[in-house]
Amino acid sequence: MKTDIEIAQETEMIHIREVAKKLNLTEDDLEYYGQYKAKFSEELWDKVKDNPDGKLILVTAINPTPAGEGKTTTTVGLGEAFGVLNKKSVIALREPSLGPCFGIKGGAAGGGYAQVVPMEDLNLHFTGDFHAITSANNLLAALLDNHIQQGNDLRIDTNQIVWKRCEDMNDRVLRNIVVGLGRKADGVVREDHFIITVASEIMAILCLAEDIHDLKERLGKVIVAYNYEGQPVTAKDLNAVGSMAALLKDAMKPNLIQTLEHTPAIIHGGPFANIAHGCNSVRATRYALKLADYVVTEAGFGADLGAEKFFDIKCRKAGLKPDAVVLVATVRALKYNGGVPKTELSKENLEALKKGIPNLEKHIENLKKYNVPVVVTLNRFITDTEAELDYVKEFCEARGCEFALSNVWEEGGAGGILLANKVLSTLETKESNFKPLYEDNLSIKDKIETIAKEIYGASDVTYDKGALAAISKIEEIGYGNLPVCMAKNQYSLSDDPTLLGRPKDFSIHIREVYVSAGAGFVVAITGTVMTMPGLPKKPAAFGIDVNEDGVITGLF
């Protein structure tokens, strides 16, 4: 069996100008990064902004398992299937992070015959957006420490610095560090921290900013520290905004590449969904809606994380109104949720399927709370039996969901025709009356508890003293009306990754809360989730290599 990267490398890509033509774009609308990648020109928006919006379709999934779900694969395959049906479609995805590519994941460009290409570029440096985000983040950190070194006119309390450095790599030893050691000229000694770039506020700002003006407004609001009087100190106070914006100028432009079947793919931004808001950029989605009749986008991890944040943060902030949701599951993953070890998932096991399917049921219930029509798809594996497939189909249809099998991994767009037709019929026959889960005027605690109880199914929420103090402070300085971004492990509906299926009678523990004032949301960190992941014992990096001809292997 061919690997994903072998399939991708055997594909004959077409020049990006030919992909752009499918969206009625010309060479003047593009800024080339070689033959197969381009950014949209800054002038393009004025050309397309008055076009009618296409249909917005979100792809999400059940909680991820080692068995695999195939959310990105389904997103790509569905976009390709629309192309097979001669529909004008585009997919809108996030950029992968180097951290998981070299850590636990090995790549994130879809799979099989439902991939975006060039997959090596996408999984590595791509167009440099993440480098720009990392640099802007760390420029602000450098300016902050330099201000303290140069006399500290803003009276920054070094015990109340909240801005963290970042890098786009999993590296647990950087979570907690000491900086400024050495001579007096080497800076002020203090504790510091690193987070992964995709969890940074700069990433969130890039993804939520409307334009350069909005970008600069948001950057100016970033809180880096508090002074001795307890008042916030911002990036604007440090005169950092202009230089940070200059670093992000090109990164603000969405990227255009293609699928294996040459469907246009707009790739931009890449926040994690377990520790950030988990969606591609507002700009990319807006461009997609103006350029195509059908836009297929995704949100990270399970629907309890990515979909919730897509609805309650991205759609709320950007005024987006999704028309349908595709919820991805696999028989294997459902059996895993039912207690079957990874080694035995290929065997038919209806009892385990019945035990694990409440996870799917909960996600269906959650999505319906947003008043958006739901289509459930099973990403099919060769080991799935007819009895297992029929059981899931009947289960979903009994709950008022459309259902379709998907075979896009093996067949590309042709394997997604059933799903595409279900989505099309849903768009034609079922109305979306989207609304967020909660109102802006609720207190921060009420928002946290609404998500914990309504989406996760928790019985109650507990808080560390520091988290409660932070909530009071955030509301005191005027940010209580912001939505909440919950940082939670992706493997369970609870904050305990070992509780599979649909756990009940559990508490969600909030250990830290802080405001991302520039991004426009409050972050609540639950359980033991880390904003700087570590590497596993055998990282994916061990299997990645490049030969004398420059051919890369081991990325999936």
Image: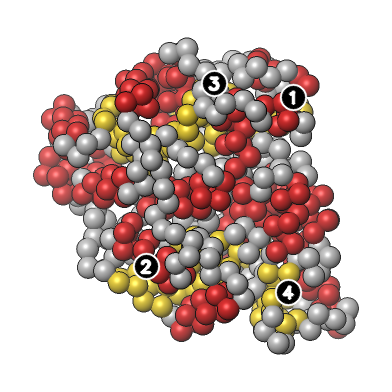
Classify mark 1: residues with Cα within 10 Å, few (<14), some (14-19) or many (20+): some
Q: Secondary structure at mark 3?
A: loop
Confirm whether residue 470 shows in the render: no
**Along the polypeptide, which appears first: circle 3 or circle 4?**
4
Which mark, by number, is residue 29? 1
Q: Residue at x 47, y 12 (%)?
A: 86
* Residue, disc 4: 233
Mark 1 or 2, nearer chain start? 1
Q: Disc 4, disc 1: CB below 8 Å?
A: no
Mark number, residue 449: 2
**103 or 389, which lies in front?**
389
Q: Nearer the viewer, residue 91 or 100?
A: 91
Disc 2 and disc 3 in contact, CB within 8 angstroms: no
Lower sequence index among marks 4 and 1:
1
Which quadrant of the figure contains the N terminus?
A: top left
- Which of the marked residues, 1 or 3, is nearer the chain's N terminus? 1
Horizontal side of 180 relative to 226 (left or right) equals: right
Front residue of this view, candidates 498 and 250: 250
Q: Where is 538 relative to 463, above or below?
A: above
Instruction: Report how far apart the C-alphas of labels 1 and 3 lie in the structure.
Output: 18 Å
Q: Is residue 259 above or below residue 497?
A: above
- Count neighbours of disc 3 (C-alpha within 10 A) and say few if under 14, some if 14 to 19, many if 20 or more: many
> What's the mark number on residue 271?
none
Mark 2 / mark 4, whichever is N-terminal:
4
Q: Helix, strand or loop at disc 4? A: strand
Which residue is label 3 attached to?
Answer: 263
Give the SS element for disc 1.
helix
Disc 1 marks which amino acid?
Asp
